[in-house]
Amino acid sequence: MHAPGFLRNTLPYIDTLYDYGAFLARASGRLGVLPAECAYDARIAIVGAGISGLVAASELLRAGARRVVVFEANPTRIGGRLLTQPINPDHPRLLAEMGAMRFPPSQAALYHYLNRFGIDSTFRFPNPGVVDTEIHYQGRAYRWMAGDAPPALFDSVDHGWRSFIRDGAQLDGGVRLPAPAELTALLRAHRYDDAQRGWQQYIDKFGDASFYSAIVTIFTGATPPGGERWRKDKDLRLFGTLGIGSGGFQPVY
């Protein structure tokens, strides 16, 4: 598998190895053209005025369709799961996301259309540790200041998780899981076959397992990432509270 020569800033998804960012970069104009015999006569209905429905309508019109109708159940707004609302009229910059909360840079297609239509977004999401954070665990509050390591209570699980991302894991029974950071580097280097083989090891081991059971397998074995076994009665709860990104992993359990 070979990546297009111009591909620089987007990555294909590890499951499909399809890069939507590269596809959209190639399609500098319309994504396609409808045959003339059906472009004017086709009656096209799109259910839902979320971002997917709006993009579909826009691209169909650009492809030559003339009779496109978008049906939306809510008569007062469009946007689907995207709903940003101000919290206090005196502080318009304080916003609450009532639907989808964050979109990582890997969402190349979304940002392509945001840029096309001049829709603003922010690239600085208030992740724990990126901004001042307060973590609540078993009735106590722990301060996590921006740029610092997590509170000392979470040292073991934080170190173990970071070690796993960097180094992968050696499981009981001899299975070696490649580091997630290594798989990302392979994708960036356009070594897609190697990345797919590495990811297949995860699928073979955990394809029928829950996220929680996979974490238990990885971190409670004889040689856990970071060198310290996690305890189910404490460390798994700590990890579920700490998590990464926008919040803890406990709901994913």
Image (tube, rainbow, N blue to C red):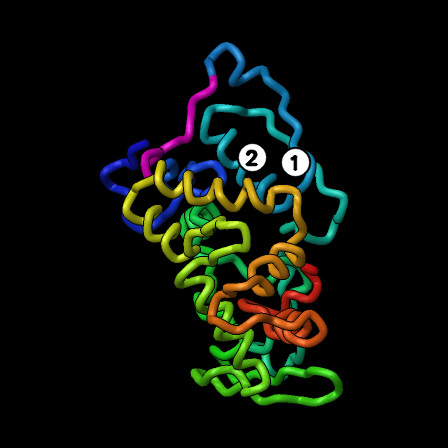
Q: Position of residue 127 (x, y in %)?
A: 52, 73
Tell me which residue sits at (44%, 66%) in the image. Answer: 123
Above or below, 143 against 245 in this view is below
Q: Position of residue 63 (x, y in %)?
A: 46, 26
Viewer can see residue 86 = no
N-term mark: 1 or 2? 2
The crowd level at tag 2 (other Cα within 10 Å; few <14, some 14-19, many 20+) is many
Asked if the residues shown at circle 1 and circle 2 are in contact, with their CB atoms under 8 angstroms apart, the answer is: yes
Tell me which residue sits at (30%, 37%) in the image. Answer: 3
Q: Secondary structure at mark 2?
A: helix
Tell me which residue sits at (59%, 82%) in the image. Answer: 91
Say which amino acid is labelled 2: Ala
Looking at the picture, tell me which residue is in the foreground, 163 or 40: 163
Q: Position of residue 99 (x, y in %)?
A: 67, 59
**Overall secondary structure of the magenta stretch?**
loop
Q: Secondary structure at mark 1?
A: strand
Above or below, 161 against 75 in this view is below
Q: Which image quadrant is residue 239 in?
A: bottom right
Looking at the picture, tell me which residue is in the foreground, 193 or 93: 193
Circle 1 is placed at which residue position?
70
Q: Position of residue 183 (x, y in %)?
A: 39, 50
Tell me which residue sits at (43%, 83%) in the image. Answer: 147
Say which amino acid is labelled 1: Val
Q: Which residues are magenta?
A: 25-34
Q: Residue farthest to the left? A: 5
| Label 1, label 2: how far apart the Cα atoms are | 7 Å
**Label disc, if present, on residue 57 of the rendered structure:** 2
